[in-house]
Image (cartoon, grey):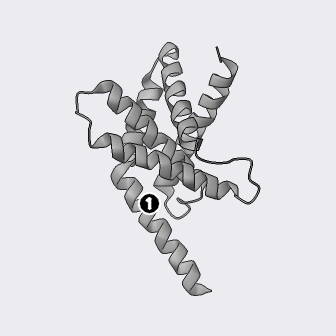
Amino acid sequence: MFGWFNSESRERRKKVRLDRTHLEERARRFLKSYLEADEARKHQFYRAVEDVSKKCHQGESLSRTDIDDARIAENTSRAAMQLVLDRAGRLHQDDRLGNFVTDACATVAIAYQRAAGVYVDDKEMQQLGTAAVHLLTMATSHTTAHED
């Protein structure tokens, strides 16, 4: 039993290290930009994270009852992380739109990692994840209310 717990804890620490390496800076930049944006620009942030979230859910059968919420969050986060990794290798530093979308992917990945409980032992990442979850929740609410 204790070996299983240590294994789970070790796996969480590994995920946190990867997130710090590939996602943290991008998610912080995205959230900071969101906070500095005027109300008219915030819609772009909402649309970006909502679109990424939907894209990462596409392969997931949400109607299956044998998949729990944590597994759905893990799978969604993994898909968003893969988008970051795929996009980051092709980006130039001055590609504002490309970096904006990649930062949105990182923010979605962080939000779903937080929802999956990955950051339980890391207060700093937990706070970042909470902010990302709040933004994703607001984005979902906003885009649902303003669908064309």
- The mark tally for this picture is 1
Q: Amino acid at mark 1?
A: Val
User: Which image quarter: residue 50?
Assistant: top right
User: Which image quarter: residue 144?
Assistant: top right
* Along the line of sight, the residue nearer the viewer: 99 or 60: 60
Identify the residue at image location x=56%, y=46%: 130
Crowdedness of circle 1 by 10 Å Cα count: few (<14), some, many (20+)?
many
Identify the residue at image location x=52%, y=65%: 121
Considering every residue shown, the one lying at the far right of the view is 65
Query: Relative to 91, is 105 on the left or the right?
Result: right
Q: Secondary structure at mark 1?
A: helix
Q: Is residue 5 above or below residue 35?
A: below
Q: Position of residue 95 (x, y in %)?
A: 27, 27
Query: Relative to 1, is 126 on the left or the right?
Result: left
Q: Is residue 96 above or below residue 2?
A: above
The residue labelled by disc 1 is 16
Q: Is residue 81 above or below residue 42?
A: below
Q: Position of residue 27 (x, y in %)?
A: 42, 41
Q: Position of residue 28 (x, y in %)?
A: 41, 40
Whether residue 25 can be seen here: no
Identify the residue at image location x=33%, y=30%: 98
* Along the line of sight, the residue nearer the viewer: 48 or 89: 89
